Amino acid sequence: MELKIRKNGFNYIIDVNGEMDLYNSYKLKELVMKMLEKKVQRFIINLENVDYIDSSGIGALIYICSTIKKMNLRLIITNIHGSVKKVIELTKLMGYFPITNSIEEAILQMED
Amino acid sequence: MSDKTYLSEMKEIRVDENSPLFDKTGMLYKEFPSDYRQIRYFTLLIVQSAPLEIKEINLLEQQISEVIKNAVKHGNQCAVDKKVRVWYSFDSTHAHLIVQDQGAGFKDLEKWNEFNKKRLEILSAQDFEKLSDFVSFRTLKSDDNDGGNALFAALEYWNGGFVFNDSRNAVAMLKSFPQKKHAIG
C-alpha cells in the first residue's frame, strides 16, 4: 500500500494505492494521526486505487473517522467501489462513513 | 425514519455441532501452521481451487482470510506449532468451508451476539451518533490491529449459515452464489 498526500486549498487529499489489509492498514492510521498533530483540519481519503480491503482496513477507517468526528474536524471518504464497497455494505457502515462519489464532490461538500 | 429491514433479517452466530455444514464428505483439505505473516498466502492456496465463474472472487478471498486470521490469531494465539485445519469445496453455485484451530474456543460468542443485536437495533433506528459505540466489538484481548468488525460482514456474507461446533474452535460456513436466470421458451 502506498500513500500520497496532495493539497487542494484547505483540503488534504490522501491517495491510497494498493490493498488495505491486515499487514498495512495501520500506516493510514499513523499518517492521519501525524497530520492531525500538524493541525490539518480537512481530510479527503481517496480509495480510487484500492481494490481490496479487510476488517483491519475497515477498522482503520472507523478509527480515523471517529477520531476526526470527536475533534470536530472534517473527513470525506471518496471513490469507494467494487469489493471495497461490498465489504463496507456487508458491515452496514455506508451510513456511518461520510462518503462521496468523487473528489470534486468531496471538495464541494467541504465548502458547505 | 426507521429501517425495519435490519431487524427483520436479524442473524446470529449459532453453535450446533450437528449442523449439516460440518459434514466433510467430498471436501478438500489443507492444514497450516499459525503463522500470522502467511495468512493471505494460505488463503490464496485455498481460493485458487474456486472456479472462474465465481464473481467477486476478491470478496470471497477476503472473507476466507478473515476466518483464517481469527483461527491463527484469536484461536491459536499465533503459536506456530498449532495448526489451522481447513476443509473446503467450491463450485459455481456455492463455497463451503470448515476452519478449525487448536485454541480454547470463541468464549465471547454470546457477548458478540448480544452486541450485534444492539448494533442492528441502532442501525434500524438510524441513530448514527449512537452507532459510534457499536462499530467495533472489543474484548480485553483486542489490539490496535483488530478491526472488531470481521464477523459483522461474515454473518451477512455466509448466507447459508455460520455455525460453531460445541467447543467453539471450529466454524463451518456456506455461501450460495446467485445463479443466472435462463430465459423460458
Image (cartoon, coloured by chain):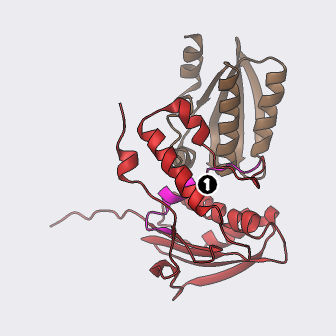
Chain colours: A brown, B red
Residue A13 occupies which quadrant of the picture?
top right
Give the farthest residue toward the bottom: B25
Residue A45 image point, x, y percent: 66, 30
Residue B9 occupies which quadrant of the picture?
bottom left
* Quadrant of the snapshot with the C terminus of chain B: bottom left
Q: Is residue A46 left or right of residue B9?
A: right
Does the magenta run of residues contain B22? no
Instruction: Tell me the crowding category of disc 1: few under 14, some 14 to 19, or many 20 or more residues within 10 angstroms, Cα based.
Output: many
| Three-letter code for the amino acid on which mark 1 is drawn | Ala
Of B16 and B145, nearer the camera is: B16
Whether B182 is drawn above or below A73: the answer is below
Q: Which residue lies under the disc numbered 1?
A: B150
Query: Measuring 59% from the left and 35% from the top, which residue is drawn there?
Result: B132
* Quadrant of the snapshot with the N terminus of chain B: top left
**Residue A66 in sight:** yes
Query: Measuring 84% from the left and 73% from the top, which residue is drawn there?
Result: B80
SS category of the residue bearing label 1 = helix
Whether B161 is drawn above or below B27: the answer is above
Residue B33 image point, x, y percent: 79, 75
Circle count:
1
Chain label for disc 1: B
Q: Give the range drawn in magenta.
A: B145-162
Of B129 and B62, nearer the camera is: B129
Whether A77 is drawn above or below B145: the answer is above
